[in-house]
């Protein structure tokens, strides 16, 4: 073991030089040690922030996404065995008095034959709650399917059914889950084209339906409030445009042939813009069992193992239209 040198650093000669060298080495080591400590501390903080950020992202991804608000009104289109309707009621995603259900099929008996093990229980559950349920409703001919006319208005039609009266509420959301025409067309190009026609007509007819129903509600509200726009303050009119257009919601499977439907393009051709989109979280709807349109069987691959998304479309309103929109008293509108 080397003998420790004694003496003063300032001394001249070999001993002083060695002492100065040892002091310098010690100082360098101390500096390096301090730098390493600071680096480890910085990395630790950085990792902690990264972990925290990842945890926050995971939390966000696990948050429940429902494409409509509980206090908003909703009409479901093309319901199969009514399990989705039952699910959103049981999970309390929607108020019973704000829900309307429609089916493309002709009658209760027809649906009993098509879905012998699931439909009747779901239907009875919803009926007992007094929710209006309509049959023979074609999403490509909504006004005609409801047999609406000047004398047979929407409010007369919907208030005839259900214990919970719809009253004079506007319609804010229309949801069509996994649109399908029920045909087993093997020609892929034809299959895509026919479903594009279905979705396009659904957009077109829903916009017409919104406008016909909601403009009356809004005009009545404006008269009642002496011209002041109440859209911001009223949860039942907050997401409607001045023309009465609400949200159109689609759920669609990922991949082909669904990607080739180009639903965003079909929406744009109807003056719609994509407001939001999110993964269809099957776990949020435990009572929902996706079925074929023509039988109780599941699809080839169980639906809950397939990726899908919700798409929420709204009527496009240009910036200039927003700026130029005025209340009847002449001031700029804040409703958008």
Image (cartoon, grey):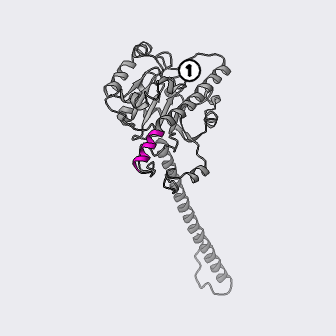
On the rendered structure, is 297 left or right of 5?
Answer: left
| Residue 308 falls in image quadrant | top right
Magenta segment, prevailing SS (helix, strand or loop) = helix
Task: Report the front residue among 250 and 291.
Answer: 250
Secondary structure of the residue carrying numbered label 1: loop
Q: Dot 1 surroundings within 10 Å: few (below 14), some, or many (20 or more)?
A: some
Q: Specify the farthest residue to the front.
A: 151
On the rendered structure, is 104 left or right of 18?
Answer: left
What residue span does the magenta drawing correspond to? Answer: 215-225
Identify the residue at image location x=48%, y=55%.
329
Is residue 21 covered in magenta? no
Tell me if residue 250 can be seen: no
Which quarter of the image is occupied by the N terminus?
A: bottom right
x and y, in percent, of residue 229 in the image: 46, 50
Task: Report the front residue among 138 and 88.
Answer: 138
| Residue 237 falls in image quadrant | top left
Establish if 310 lies above or below 19.
above
Identify the residue at image location x=59%, y=73%.
26
Establish if 110 lies above or below 134.
above
Identify the residue at image location x=43%, y=49%.
230
x and y, in percent, of residue 207 in the image: 54, 34
Task: Report the front residue among 4 and 65.
Answer: 65
x and y, in percent, of residue 85 in the image: 41, 28
Tell me if residue 133 can be seen: yes
Give the number of marks. 1
Q: Specify the farthest residue to the bottom.
A: 11
On the rendered structure, is 157 left or right of 264?
Answer: left
x and y, in percent, of residue 234 in the image: 41, 47
Establish if 325 lies above or below 305.
below
Residue at which label 1 appears: 181
């Amino acid at each position: 073991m080397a003998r420790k040198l004694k003496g003063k650093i300032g001394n001249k000669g070999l001993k002083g030089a060695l002492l100065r060298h040892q002091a310098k080495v010690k100082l360098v080591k101390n500096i390096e040690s301090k730098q390493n400590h600071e680096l480890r501390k910085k990395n630790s903080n950085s990792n902690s922030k990264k972990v925290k950020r990842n945890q926050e992202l995971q939390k966000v991804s696990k948050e429940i996404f429902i494409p409509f608000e509980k206090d908003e009104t909703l009409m479901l289109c093309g319901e199969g065995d009514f399990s989705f309707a039952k699910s959103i009621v049981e999970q309390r995603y929607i108020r019973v008095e704000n829900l309307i259900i429609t089916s493309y099929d002709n009658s209760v008996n027809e649906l009993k034959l098509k879905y012998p093990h699931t439909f009747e229980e779901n239907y009875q559950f919803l009926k007992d709650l007094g929710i209006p349920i309509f049959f023979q409703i074609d999403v490509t001919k909504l006004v005609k399917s409801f047999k609406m006319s000047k004398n047979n208005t929407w409010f007369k039609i919907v208030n005839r059914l259900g214990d919970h009266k719809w009253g004079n509420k506007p319609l804010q959301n229309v949801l069509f889950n996994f649109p399908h025409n029920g045909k087993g067309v093997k020609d892929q190009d034809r299959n895509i084209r026919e479903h594009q026609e279905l979705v396009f007509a659904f957009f077109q007819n829903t916009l017409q339906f919104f406008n016909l129903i909601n403009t009356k509600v809004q005009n009545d509200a404006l008269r009642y409030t002496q011209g002041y726009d109440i859209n911001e303050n009223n949860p039942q009119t907050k997401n409607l445009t001045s023309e009465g257009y609400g949200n159109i919601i689609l759920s669609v499977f990922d991949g082909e042939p669904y990607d080739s439907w180009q639903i965003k393009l079909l929406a744009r051709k109807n003056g719609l813009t994509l407001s939001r989109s999110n993964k269809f979280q099957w776990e949020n709807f435990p009572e929902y069992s996706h079925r074929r349109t023509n039988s109780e069987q599941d699809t080839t691959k169980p639906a809950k193992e397939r990726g899908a998304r919700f798409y929420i479309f709204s009527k496009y309103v240009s910036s200039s239209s927003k700026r130029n929109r005025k209340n009847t008293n002449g001031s700029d509108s804040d409703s958008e």
